[in-house]
Image (spheres, grey):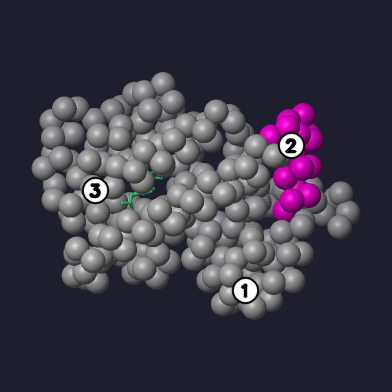
Amino acid sequence: TSLLHIEELCASIVRSHRETSQYRVEELQALRWKIFTREEIQMYHSKSVDEMWQLCADRLSDAVQYVVEFAKRLPGFRQIRQNDQINLLKSGSMEVVLVRMSRLFNTENSTVFFDGKFAGTEVFKSLLCADLIMAVFDFAHSMSALRLTEPQVAIFSALVLINPDRPGLEDRGRVQRLRKDIELALSHILHRDNQESLVHRLYQKVPVLKGLCSLHIDKLHWFRQLYPLTVHTHFPPLYKELFG
Ligand SMILES: CCS(=O)(=O)c1ccc(CC(=O)Nc2nc(-c3ccccc3)c(C(=O)c3ccccc3CC(C)C)s2)cc1
């Protein structure tokens, strides 16, 4: 793999991210201080557990759809076996959503962008999974502290998705080769940005992401035991397919 190939790979990953990012950071900067009023928070608190879960599942599956589109535009992803593509998305799409959401986290008032405004943890009280919510907020805080540029977010997202260690991969070798190129792309841009120190701090986030995703799955299974019909009838198919 020549330097030119790596530079082209960088450019195409960054373009795929920009084309599928759902919201751009600069777009949301203007909304940073649009936080929910007491009445609006009251409205979320008056929602039942299953109504709030349904709202979040809808929003989350919107976000996941953009990540699926990002994956499809990643050079080399389409050349991976269909089953392996599904496998990588099943295990990695939530991780990329979490990395992306952290870009829109407002560290000054600890709010995430949700349902049109910026929400603190209290907005999510009706979900009855405070530990998951706290963990997501803590992750968003720690990611924001790295102050990643969009190209760095793009290539880190590709790295998170193209993970040859996922269980059940049929053609692991092909995923490994693509992963190697993406690792070169990440060190290339961090070198260019004179931020080589970021490499190990980014790799340290990978197990944290893994933990967050299993916590999300555990909570979903808890919720599905309480409200099987809601999940079966009202949850988006993509959400069920990827996390169910
Ligand atoms: C991702 C692309 S983006 O352009 O950055 C973008 C695009 C769109 C948005 C708006 C948005 O959908 N925000 C959501 N926020 C949260 C959330 C919720 C609790 C704490 C922290 C953030 C959503 C969730 O449903 C969620 C996310 C992570 C783990 C767990 C959950 C809830 C469980 C019950 C499904 S959806 C935000 C950002």
Residue drawn at x 41%, y 21% as measured from the top left: 108
Give the labeled residue for mark 1: 169
Q: Is residue 141 left or right of residue 203?
A: left
Give the labeled residue for mark 2: 190
Distance Cα–Cα, label 1 vs label 2: 29 Å
Q: Position of residue 47 (x, y in %)?
A: 14, 47
Residue drawn at x 69%, y 72% as measured from the top left: 172
Give amino acid for label 1: Leu
Disc 3 on helix, strand or loop?
helix
Q: Position of residue 147 (x, y in %)?
A: 58, 29
Find residue 57 and report its image quarter. bottom left
User: As rendered, which of 125 and 106 lies closer to the eye?
Assistant: 125
Observer able to see residue 61: no
**What label sits on residue 209 in the rendered view?**
none
**Residue 82 higher or lower than 195, as above or below:** below
Q: Is residue 56 left or right of residue 32?
A: left
Give the labeled residue for mark 3: 127
User: As rendered, which of 164 and 155 lies closer to the eye?
Assistant: 164
Give amino acid for label 3: Leu
Badge 1: residue crowd in 10 Å (few <14, some 14–19, many ≥20): some
**Residue 82 higher or lower than 184, as above or below:** below
Disc 2 on helix, strand or loop?
helix
Find residue 35 and report its image quarter. top left
Residue drawn at x 77%, y 29% as measured from the top left: 194
Observer able to see residue 146: yes
